[in-house]
Image (spheres, coloured by chain):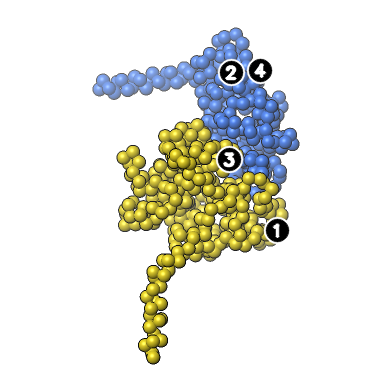
Chain colours: A blue, B yellow
Amino acid sequence: MKALQRVLMSSALLLLVDNAQALDGKKIFMEGGAQPGAMPCVACHGADGSGMAAAGFPRLAGLPAPYVRKQLEDFKSGSRSSPVMRPLAIALTQAEVDALSQAIAAMPAPAPAALHRSEMPTTAAQQLAWQGAWERQIPACVSCHGPAGSGIGDAFPPLAGQPAAYLAAQLSAWQNGTRRNDANDLMGHIAKSLTAEEVQGVAQYFASLNVEAKP
Amino acid sequence: MKAHLITPAVGLLMVLPSHAATIAMEDQSQLVPHSVKSSASVFQPPAEKDLPDNAYGKLVRQGYALFVDTKRLAPKFVGNGLNCSNCHLNQGRLANSAPLWAAYPMYPAYRKKNDKVNTYAERLQGCFQFSMNGGTPPAADSPEITALSVYSYWLASKAPLGVELPGRGYPEVAQPAEGYSLARGAQVYGEQCAVCHGPQGQGQKVGDDYAMPPLWGKDSYNWGAGMHRINTAASFIKHNMPLGKGGSLSDQQAWDVAAYVNSHERPQDPRLVDGSVEKTRLKFHANDGVNLYGQTVEGVLIGQGIR
């Protein structure tokens, strides 16, 4: 009986803690962190976290919490360089980063329409995205980011439906070394092999993939 | 007189079995392939954009689709989570990654694996049975084998027949002098492979389908697949892994991590003899390159299979 009570109490407590964190994270997203300089995310990434395509601000909604946490840490350390995000990331406490990452992961994420590897490409951008360019050791984008660009696991973020300007800016950042926060330079060495035309091509391709909000 | 005529014939019949044994052939599918360093010397398969818009072109496209999306399109014949293109990179086009254009022109060929001359269709059936853990493979004249054969034939367009092309198979990476170490392999795996294949070798899925292939466990290749040999896996890994960074691991790292991967359980060898791992080891694994099947590692018998 005692054991049951303990289980019930601890699950209630867990619920409370969970809830508190979720509330916290959403609040930080909407209103900013406690310290000065921790501006609210909503200003650039939108109330639903879907970003702002025209300005090249990426969608955050539904990104895996470990991925978001790592990006904030990397903005802080400079391995992902961004004059806008760096001061914001520095102003967030560790607890705020954790709560925010959870809240962002929990925001309803759009799902790209299913695409299968069996499709044969018809454009140069599709060919790069679906098959790669192996004469330059470039694997298909979809090998790591998923057949429809929906992202895989915690390390490979979604590309589908992200703003073309954001995707192109990131590829440029990988190329010039201002972004170097990937595992084993997996992305860096690929980006460095892409031509300017290819960067634009794949950025536009993934941006053009229709994503539908999950109910 | 009659007796004299018969005697040589009988004698010939009698010596046939032992004679057959003494002319054991080299396994033509296992000749040491040459690796390709410079892309200038590599065979160039035709481009997809040049495919004719006719029945032949259509069949090539079907073969392509099956090759890169095997599990989803041929679920009846794929018992695990793999696609052909997991081990034959770039849709079967990449040199040093067992490209189809180098395989197709080498068949029919004698294979030790089943001790007979195999047609290309039979070779494909072997892939289904072992690498795809697919049970009874599609028939030689099935739509699957036909489409995959036609796709291979097309990739090999203008390749010389019966000539070993550079970049065929997974060119051998010799075992390092000090052998291999599972402990070091575990470390390489954690640092270089787990980000895609998962810390437990389980692969990663998008929806119901694997996007990154499982390397061991129930959804990976079985104990009869060529990739279960440490030497074969080491060669594949050295030339092709991590994806897009082929050649970046040392020979030692490739062997260590190949041994680590192939020290894990996977589906049983479908040729299992009398339910005995030991009998199966003696018959099929004892002389099959470097492998751990039927051996005991840290007190555990390897090769018990997983369902």
Q: Which mark is residue A84?
A: 4
- Which residue is tagged 2? A77
How far apart, in angstroms, are the residues tagged by discs 4 and 1?
52 Å
Measured from the top left, where is residue B40 in percent x and y?
69, 48
Going by the numbered disc 2, the residue's amino acid type is Ser
Taking the image as shown, residue A63 lies to the left or right of residue B24, namely right
| Tag 1 subunit | B
- Of B52 and B158, the residue lying toward us: B158
Q: Is residue B194 visible to the viewer in this orientation of the structure?
A: no
Would you identify the image quadrant in which residue B155 lies? bottom right
Query: Badges 2 and 4: C-beta atoms under 8 Å apart?
Result: no
Circle on res. B52: 1
> Quick check: can you spot residue A85?
yes
At x 46%, y 41%, the residue is: B177
Q: Are marks 1 and 3 on the same chain?
A: yes
Q: Position of residue B66 (x, y in %)?
A: 56, 53
* Mark 1 vs 3: CB contact within 8 A: no
What is the three-letter code of the residue carrying label 1?
Pro
C-alpha distance separating marks 1 and 3: 33 Å
Q: Chain of mark 4?
A: A
Earlier in the chain: of badge 2 and badge 4, it is 2
